[in-house]
Image (cartoon, rainbow, N blue to C red):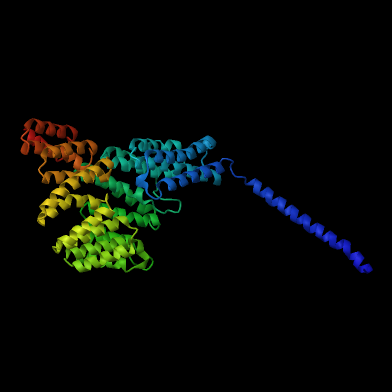
């Protein structure tokens, strides 16, 4: 080893030592920086409890939810409620804060979502009162969760609405509209469920024939929507609100004004947005009865790849137009497209299957029609279309000369509609099942059962359109079919007492004279 080499050796060791020191200091600095952002100690627990609850739900309800027992539902609900309890135990101080850090926001979001999941599971398991209880207290427990509060109030309002309690639904919706303004996130992306509420309330009163309330809320809706459009004109919120304002014009029987307004909802190329195009097509087809222009608009939608989410509905409407025009082969070709391309759109699939069956019935191919109706019942057993099909099959079979089979389906349809009625009591499906059951029993001239169903319907759905008419109709049956003037009078008197201001009640008053 030379003298030069001996001299150079200490320098190499010194360089290594300096490099190690720098690396060590850097590592310590990074660790210290990480410690400065230490997560809230309870967040890990909340995350674990939340994911455990999700796993429990996937395990119990993921494959065959219809096999889940009450104990299964309660086990999952308890798992989600442990998330809420842990949050309230560790983050109670958030009630006094106006803004949250990242960990606090994450914990609040998971806890709020967990409480909503518990409410949903109570509803699915048939415990609607417990569901309502949780939803009603949500705002108090999570006053800062703006979006979750909106979801809770919407769900609570829908439940009251499904039960026919318009006044209670109205109260909930108005409070939501007051608190959730503007109805959008910080980037002005609209919340469509909240935006829909003003015109939805007007529709609720329109359905029960309350013209004064309908007019009041149409005025409210126009003012609300126009205010948003004026204030947020060129934002996503402003553009979306135009569609809801158009909906109020349709309710006021101004379809052409609605179309003119919707045609202003355009992109940078001047093309009408797909959702507005869909509304225009619907107005042409429904309000104006102009199937030619409706077809043109629907075809624009299915030929525009940018609006693929609207394709299933547009194809369905085109199939309906072909059906109305007696172009059954073209109708079935479009239904085939729906079945092949959009298998996950269950509601669209059920409706398409119903149209398919009706197309064969229209061609008097009763055997094929019956087969397609049965396929609908097997695969979409509690859909709106299935409920209508249970009602339709007995007279369909009689018309085809199948009296023995028709009697069999009288019994089968009555049983199935009764089951759906009971399983979905207080919900839209339950109301649909009960009204169809009433029609089926009337066809069989089982008048005592019909009156019982009408009275039950009024108690279960007191503010629905069907509910507000039920006692009058029951009274008419007692009088005209059963010859029971005493019970007829009782029914008319209850109609007058419960619905004194509705136009339909005038008929009950006349019957009492």
Check the image and name the residue furthest to the right.
3
Tell me which residue sits at (51%, 38%) in the image.
87
Q: Position of residue 144 (x, y in %)?
A: 47, 41
Of 56 and 102, nearer the camera is 56
Q: Position of residue 106 (x, y in %)?
A: 52, 46
Check the image and name the residue furthest to the front.
404
Q: How many marks?
A: 0
Q: Position of residue 510 (x, y in %)?
A: 8, 36
In the rendered structure, the answer to whether residue 200 lies left or right of residue 484 reads right
Q: Is residue 264 visible?
A: no
The vertical placement of 120 against 381, above or below, is above
Q: Is residue 59 visible?
A: yes
The vertical placement of 173 against 279, above or below, is above
Q: Residue 187 sits in which quadrant?
A: bottom left
Q: Residue 461 sits in which quadrant?
A: top left
Of 359 and 402, nearer the camera is 402
The vertical placement of 129 against 65, above or below, is above
In the rendered structure, the answer to whether residue 146 lies left or right of residue 363 reads right
Tell me which residue sits at (34%, 35%) in the image.
129
- In the picture, which quadrant includes the C terminus? top left
Of 459 and 92, nearer the camera is 459
- In the picture, which quadrant includes the N terminus? bottom right
């Amino acid at each position: 080893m030379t003298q030069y080499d001996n001299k150079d050796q200490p320098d190499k060791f010194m360089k290594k030592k300096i490099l190690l020191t720098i690396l060590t200091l850097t590592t310590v600095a990074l660790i210290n920086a990480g410690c400065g952002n230490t997560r809230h100690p309870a967040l890990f627990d909340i995350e674990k409890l939340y994911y455990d609850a999700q796993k429990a739900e996937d395990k119990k309800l993921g494959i065959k939810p219809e096999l889940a027992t009450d104990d299964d539902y309660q086990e999952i609900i308890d798992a989600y409620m442990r998330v809420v309890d842990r949050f309230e135990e560790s983050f109670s101080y958030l009630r006094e804060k106006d803004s949250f850090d990242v960990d606090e926001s994450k914990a609040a979001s998971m806890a709020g979502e967990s409480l909503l999941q518990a409410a949903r599971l109570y509803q699915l398991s048939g415990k609607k009162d417990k569901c309502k209880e949780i939803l009603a207290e949500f705002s108090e427990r999570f006053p800062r969760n703006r979006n979750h509060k909106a979801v809770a109030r919407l769900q609570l309002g829908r439940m009251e609405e499904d039960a026919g309690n318009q006044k209670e639904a109205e109260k909930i919706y108005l409070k939501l509209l007051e608190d959730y303004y503007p109805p959008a996130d910080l980037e002005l992306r609209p919340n469509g469920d909240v935006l829909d509420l003003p015109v939805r309330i007007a529709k609720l009163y329109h359905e029960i024939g309350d013209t004064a309330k309908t007019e009041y809320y149409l005025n409210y809706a126009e003012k609300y929507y126009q205010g948003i459009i004026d204030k947020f004109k060129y934002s996503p919120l402003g553009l979306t609100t135009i569609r809801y304002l158009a909906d109020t014009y349709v309710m006021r029987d101004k379809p052409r004004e609605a179309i003119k307004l919707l045609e202003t909802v355009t992109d940078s190329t001047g093309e009408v947005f797909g959702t507005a195009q869909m509304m225009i097509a619907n107005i042409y087809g429904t309000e104006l009865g102009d199937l030619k222009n409706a077809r043109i608009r629907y075809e624009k939608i299915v030929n525009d790849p940018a609006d693929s989410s609207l394709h299933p509905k547009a194809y369905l409407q085109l199939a309906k137009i072909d059906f109305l025009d007696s172009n059954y082969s073209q109708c079935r070709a479009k239904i085939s497209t729906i079945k092949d391309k959009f298998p996950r759109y269950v509601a669209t699939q059920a409706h398409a299957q119903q149209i398919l069956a009706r197309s064969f019935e229209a061609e008097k191919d009763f055997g094929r029609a019956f087969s397609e109706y049965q396929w609908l019942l097997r695969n979409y057993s509690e859909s709106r279309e299935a409920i209508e099909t249970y009602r339709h099959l007995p007279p369909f079979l009689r018309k085809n000369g199948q009296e023995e089979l028709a009697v069999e389906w009288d019994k089968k349809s009555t049983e199935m509609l009764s089951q759906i009625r009971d399983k979905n009591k207080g919900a839209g499906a339950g109301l649909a099942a009960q009204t169809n059951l009433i029609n089926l029993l009337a066809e069989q001239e089982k008048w005592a059962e019909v009156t019982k169903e009408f009275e039950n319907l009024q108690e279960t759905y007191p503010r629905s359109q069907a509910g507000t008419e039920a006692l009058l109709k029951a009274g008419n049956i007692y009088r005209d079919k059963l010859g029971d003037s005493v019970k007829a009078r009782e029914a008319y008197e209850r109609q007058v007492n419960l619905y004194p201001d509705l136009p339909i009640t005038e008929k009950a008053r006349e019957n009492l004279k």
